[in-house]
Image (cartoon, helix red, strand yellow):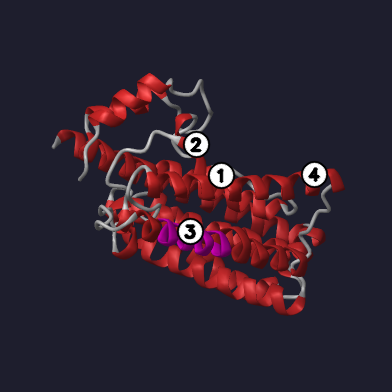
Amino acid sequence: MRGSRLASTSAVTWGRLYFAGQALAGVAWWIAVFTVPDVRTATLGTLDPRLLAVADIPLFVVASALVALGVRRAAWIAAPWTLLVAIGMGLYATVTATAGWGALLMVAAAAGSTGAAILVLVGRVPSNWLLIGPFRFRSAPPMNTRALVSKATLQTVVFSAIFLLALPAVIVVLELRWGLHVAFPPALRIGGAALFAAALALSTWSSAAMSVQGAGTPLPSSMPRRLVISGPYRFVRNPMAIGVMAGSWLVVVYALCGSLVWNTVVRPLEEADLEERFGSAFLAYRDRVACWLPRRPLAASEGAHEESVSSDV
């Protein structure tokens, strides 16, 4: 119980610290807007800063400062207002092709404000909120290998189409429209394409290992029934999370943010589920194989021993 209270206090403190930083950043930005024409143009375009300041200073700067000082209810003002401004600035930048930096900063502020408000109001990172619908951990129902391979392949294609193609494409379009694009050297773009192809191949290999060796799929609601330590999982515990498609610096940021969220929020839940289902076999595997950086692969004898320890769930 004491540990829970300490964790809650720590989460609230981090949320308040974020809002303190946001309040200070807001003050600095508004000073720059009224004193540096280039900042005003880059972040607001042709919008009249005086009209915006009337609403934004009390609802963004002052509300953020109040949260930092311990007025928790002010989070219900600062976070929704920041999200509303982010949406408005995003639409404005997309229509006018101006104020791109302002739109980007407000999108970042909206994400930060939302996360910090949750910490302040809930007192923790509510990672359990993710465990719903197709993201709830459940073992795959018994089915033949061919059906599992087909199901896993479809999941990989859908995941890649959404998170590795569609969303990055949207980001690139906005980056160009908002005037934020920075041209990468041709060699780096070629390397990015090769890395994307390698990441897709690695995902396919991982999915096949889950289906054939684990009797499951990558989707949390259809998890492998056996602990998978063969194929790419001999080298690294999360081969499907490795790979960044280059060509846009915002896409790189998107990939890094996704990796951060997965590593800090999703991975602990997944590993707790694996430990509960496979016990000492998973713990031995976790101690031997790194999460991100590949190590010396498991020896065949080690893999065979651990796989024999794991059992169907």
Residue 188's label in the rendered image is: 4
Q: What is the magenta segment's predominant secondary structure?
A: helix
Q: Say which amino acid is labelled 2.
A: Pro
Report crowding for label 4: few under 14, some 14 to 19, many 20 or more residues within 10 A (C-alpha).
Answer: few
Which SS class for mark 2? Answer: helix
Q: Nearer the viewer, residue 193 or 130?
A: 193
Quarter of the rendering containing residue 141: bottom left
Q: Percent position (x, y) of residue 280?
A: 23, 27
Q: Residues within 10 Å of mark 3 (few under 14, many from 20)?
A: many
Q: Mark 4 or 1, which is nearer the eye?
A: 1
**Of the residues shown, which amino acid type is indicated by label 4?**
Leu
Q: Which mark is residue 153?
A: 3
Magenta residues, start to end: 149-162
Residue marked by disc 2: 232
> Residue lying furthest left in this view?
1
Of pointers 4 and 1, the one earlier in the residue sequence: 4
**CA distance for labels 3 and 1:** 12 Å
Please provide percent x and percent y for residue 122: 28, 54
Give whichever of discs 3 and 1 has the lower sequence position. Answer: 3
